[in-house]
Image (spheres, helix red, strand yellow):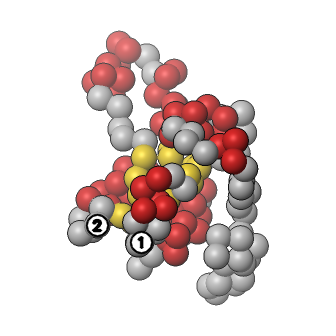
Amino acid sequence: MLARAVEGEREWQAAVHLVDDRRWDGVTGDEALAAAAWDGELSVVFLADGVTMRSPLRPLLALDLGADDDEDLDPVYYQEIIDSPQPREVRVVPEAVHMVHGNLQLANVDFPEFIEDAASDPHGVVRDV
């Protein structure tokens, strides 16, 4: 499902890199972020973890790579943001992965908006609407 072309007004190829390697079993979100941080083009990583495998919804853990942008903020002006960082993860059903990724890439929606969407969902996940 994730590697299929995305349908819409125009069909476009999904920009995904699937990793299916037992060496990644049990990886934490922080470890996945550290491994993906070298790629400046990435804005989000989707991780299939234990929660994903146990839930009938199969919600992937979306990890915000842009959250580290706050590291360069001047504490004189941005101390409140530095002291209270935004959450950097949210659960996303597989059907919504391309929507989340595309909106983040185009800067149509910020990561915190997806967190708000998930908070209003009865299962705490972002869904494709």
Could you tell me which quadrant the N terminus lies in? bottom right
Q: Is residue 114 left or right of residue 100?
A: left
Residue 72 picture location, percent across and down:
51, 21
The image quadrant of residue 25 is: top right
Q: Which mark is residue 66?
A: none
Quadrant location, the C terminus: bottom left
Residue, disc 1: 57
Q: CA distance from mark 1 to mark 2?
A: 9 Å
Against 70, residue 53 (above or below) is below
Q: Is residue 66 visible?
A: no
Q: What SS does tag 2 mark?
A: loop
Residue 59's x, y, as percent? 45, 64
- Number of other residues with Cα within 10 Å of mark 2, as a class: few under 14, some 14 to 19, many 20 or more: few
The residue at the far top in this view is 76
Residue at (59, 49) in percent of width and height: 45
Is residue 112 placed above or below 78 in the rendered structure? below
Q: Earlier in the sequence, mark 1 or mark 2?
A: 1
Rendered location of residue 38, percent (x, y): 71, 33
Instruction: Determine whether, in the image, residue 125 is placed left or right of residue 32.
Output: left
- Identified by mark 1, the residue type is Leu
Q: Is residue 8 left or right of residue 70?
A: right
Residue 3 seen in the figure = yes
Numbered circle sitting on residue 123: 2
Labels 1 & 2 near each other (Cβ < 8 A): yes
Give residue 126's quadrant in the image.
Answer: bottom left
Q: Residue at x 36, y 41 (%)?
A: 87
Report the amino acid beneath label 2: His
